[in-house]
Amino acid sequence: MKTYIALWRAVNVAGRNMVSMRDLCGMLEGLGMEDVRSLLQSGNVVFRSKSSSAQAVERLIERESQSRIGFETDVFVRSARDWQQIVAHNPFPREAAEDPGHLLMMCLKEAPPRGAADALQRTIVGREVVRTWGAHAYIVYPDGVGRSRLTAVAIEKGLGSRGTGRNWNTVSKLAALGRSEV
């Protein structure tokens, strides 16, 4: 059995795509996943699966979401070991330690093309900073996400891939949950 971390995109946001974490966990259990645990109410789940492929698990969950929870959405699955690498490759360790609520990590469906992060950075009018590693973006919002004009839509357009983000507090908590299972 391998431990995975799954992030649902845009669940329980502004009254849209409402789903209880109990229902998400139940869906995964119905798909044969074990030791299913959720974190917060925003679609973060840690579980164990017999599958050795995060991509296969991701495709299965996305395929079953419509019929089992009532809506279709992107899901981003990483192994617990991959999650540890995501944490290790954070280019903003000072921000992670001093202001984790203003540091986001965004899982992407695909790694951005070479130079995409630099091109996106040049379009930013505020103090935000974007860096990428593989299919992950790290974004510092020194003035807060809510006030920023660097939206998820702008990031996805600039990086050429759909994604979902979590602040560093959540990333760290998921790392701890996943580490306990590695």
Image (spheres, grey):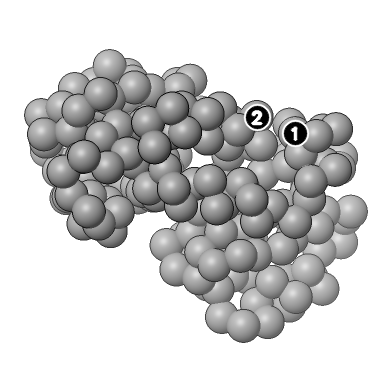
Identify the residue at image location x=27%, y=16%. Answer: 22
Identify the residue at image location x=47%, y=33%. Answer: 179
**Crowd band around label 2 with a 10 angstrom C-alpha radius: few (<14), some (14–19), many (20+):** some
Residue 24 badge = none
Q: Where is the C terminus found, in terms of image quarters?
A: top left
Query: In which image quadrant can residue 80 be found?
Result: top left
Query: In which image quadrant can residue 9 be found?
Result: top left
Q: Amino acid at mark 1?
A: Pro
Q: Amino acid at mark 2?
A: Asn
Is residue 20 placed above or below 11 in the rendered structure? above
Residue 10 place in picture, x, y as percent: 44, 39
3D distance between C-alphas at marks 1 and 2: 6 Å
The reply, left or right, for residue 51 in relation to residue 156 is left
Residue under numbered circle 1: 100
Of residue 41 and residue 81, the one placed in the foreground of this image is 81
Of residue 145 and residue 91, the one placed in the foreground of this image is 91
Residue under numbered circle 2: 169
Q: Secondary structure at mark 1?
A: helix
Is residue 127 placed above or below 34 in the rendered structure? below
Is residue 142 placed above or below 100 in the rendered structure? below
| Residue 169 seen in this snapshot | yes
Residue 132 place in picture, x, y as percent: 65, 64
Q: Are marks 1 and 2 in contact (CB under 8 Å)?
A: yes
Identify the residue at image location x=53%, y=46%. Answer: 84
Of the two numbered discs 1 and 2 on the same chain, state the one appearing first in sequence.
Answer: 1
Q: Secondary structure at mark 2?
A: helix
| Residue 5 seen in this snapshot | no
The reply, left or right, for residue 28 in relation to residue 161 is left
Residue 67 place in picture, x, y as percent: 11, 38
Residue 181 place in picture, x, y as percent: 37, 31
